[in-house]
Image (tube, grey):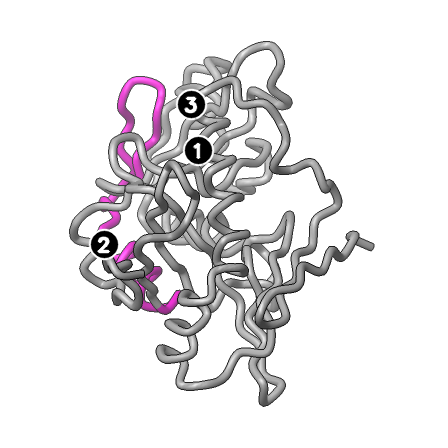
Amino acid sequence: MDTLITIFSEFDIKTESPDKTDFLQPVCSKNALVAKNGLRAEMTICLQENIKQSLELYFNSSIKCLTRIHGKKYDIIIEFEDGTKTKIQNKDGDGKGRGWSVDRRKVESFKDEQLIKLLKTLCLKQGTEKPVISNNISKNVINMCMLGVIEEEYPKYFTHTKSNKSTGNIISMSICNTNTLITFMHKELYNVMETKRTCVHLSPNCYLQRKGGGKKDFNPDNIQMKFKFTEEIEKIFINIFTQTTSQ
């Protein structure tokens, strides 16, 4: 069972993680820095009082506690005073450029034989076949990579935060219902997957590539999905918090 660390503030805040040193590891690359900033943002959501208040206004319900979860497709569980709970996945930063990494797994776990052939050829340089993959398969990939494979563990909401690089405080936060986001992502899919250099593109904002990362990284041949937070996607998120100069 994961170790449960309780942090006391003006309200009940908890974080679950098997490794208390998550936030003490040295940062050696840009990807590691992005990951560390993401973990720090998850902690800050649980600690920052005005974020709690903003979530209460959005959900129109008092929050009993916020719990950070490690190793799931959702990052935080919100437990309300009435006993109900909801799960959110948070992404921190602008998410533009090459986008956020939202999933990584072995190539065989994609399960579709033709897609596996394409990924091995293009991303892993282990074959020559380039089958044409329809957007019906792309929808399955989006669902698996964004939500996971266990329906009870699907995040119910996605949140987007921007943080102060110096203090770590969250300066803005927006939120989107998962169904709304996934529906939008499905609508943007190409009719068939597009191949570009060493990547397989599902849509203008979503693509698959080899994880890589050098000799010290585990499982460099895993396939990761990258998700670009475009202006069009940003429009479907509802802003619930913006830090003012007085805060």
Q: Which residue is located at x 56 percent, y 20 percent?
A: 220
Mark 2: amino acid: Ile
Above or below for 138 versus 13: above
Above or below for 245 versus 168: below
Choose the circle earlier in sequence order: 3 or 2: 3
Specify the farthest residue to the top: 215
Above or below for 7 versus 229: below
Q: CA distance from mark 1 to mark 2?
A: 20 Å
Q: Which residue is located at x 76 percent, y 57 percent?
A: 4
Q: Which residue is mark 1?
A: 34
Q: Which image quarter is the N terminus in?
A: bottom right
Is 102 within the magenta?
no
Picture disc at residue 18: none
Q: Which image quarter is the C terminus in?
A: bottom left
Q: Which residue is mark 3?
A: 30
Q: Which of the two residues, 130 or 201, is positioned nearer the viewer here?
A: 201
Instruction: Indicate the quadrant where residue 10 lies.
Output: bottom right
Query: Circle 3 — which element?
Result: helix
